[in-house]
Structures are given as C-alpha cells and as structure tokens.
C-alpha cells in the first residue's frame, strides 16, 4: 500500500510540474513574418481611414479632461 501511495504521489507531482513548465513557456501565436505583415496591414488601414485616429484622439482627450475634473 505504501508503494502505491508513493507512486501516486510521484506521478501526480510530475504531472503538476510538467504542466507548470509548459505553461510558463508559451509559444508565440504568430511567426515574426506574420507579425510584420499584420503591422503592415494595420498601418495601411490607418492611412486609408484617418477618421479612426481622429476618433481615438478625441476619446483620449475626453478621458484626460474627465480625470482632471
């Protein structure tokens, strides 16, 4: 019975440490090339739609004014 309990403890400990080790080293979602392309697409969109930047700027200004009050 003691050997079974010890074995269960060792296996449980291994599983816990293994899952923690895998969780602490996340894999990147995108490759560097994909990240670069996403940046290019975002930049192209913002250049083509400057109203987005204006709306963001206005929203930021309002938040700053509200905090100052």
Image (tube, rainbow, N blue to C red):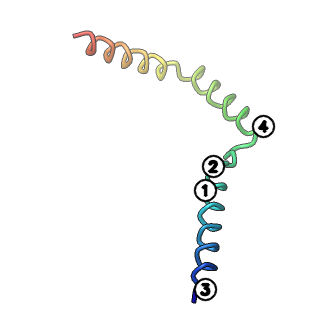
**Crowd tier of the residue under label 2, counting other residues whose Cα lies within 10 Å: few below 14, some 14–19, many 20 or above:** few
Foreground label between 1 and 3:
3
Foreground label between 3 and 4:
3
64 is higher (above) or lower (below) than 1? above
37 is higher (above) or lower (below) than 66? below
The residue pinned by badge 2 equals: 24
C-alpha span from label 2 to label 3: 30 Å
Quadrant of residue 7 within the rendered picture: bottom right
Residue 56 percent across, percent down from the top left:
43, 20
Which numbered disc, 3 or 4, marks the residue that appears first in the sequence? 3
Foreground label between 2 and 4:
2
The residue pinned by badge 4 equals: 33
The residue pinned by badge 3 equals: 4
C-alpha span from label 3 to label 4: 51 Å
Element class at badge 1: helix
Foreground label between 2 and 3:
3
Asked if the residue under mark 3 is in contact with the one under mark 1, i.e. CB atoms within 8 Å, the reply is no
| Residue sticking out furthest to the left | 69
Quarter of the figure with the N terminus: bottom right
45 is higher (above) or lower (below) than 25? above
Quadrant of residue 55 within the rendered picture: top left
């Amino acid at each position: 019975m003691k050997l079974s309990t010890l074995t269960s403890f060792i296996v449980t400990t291994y599983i816990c440490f293994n899952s923690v080790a895998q969780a602490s080293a996340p894999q990147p979602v995108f490759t560097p090339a994909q990240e670069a392309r996403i940046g290019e697409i975002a930049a192209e969109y913002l250049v083509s739609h400057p109203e987005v930047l204006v709306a963001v700027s206005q929203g930021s200004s309002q938040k700053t004014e509200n905090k100052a009050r």
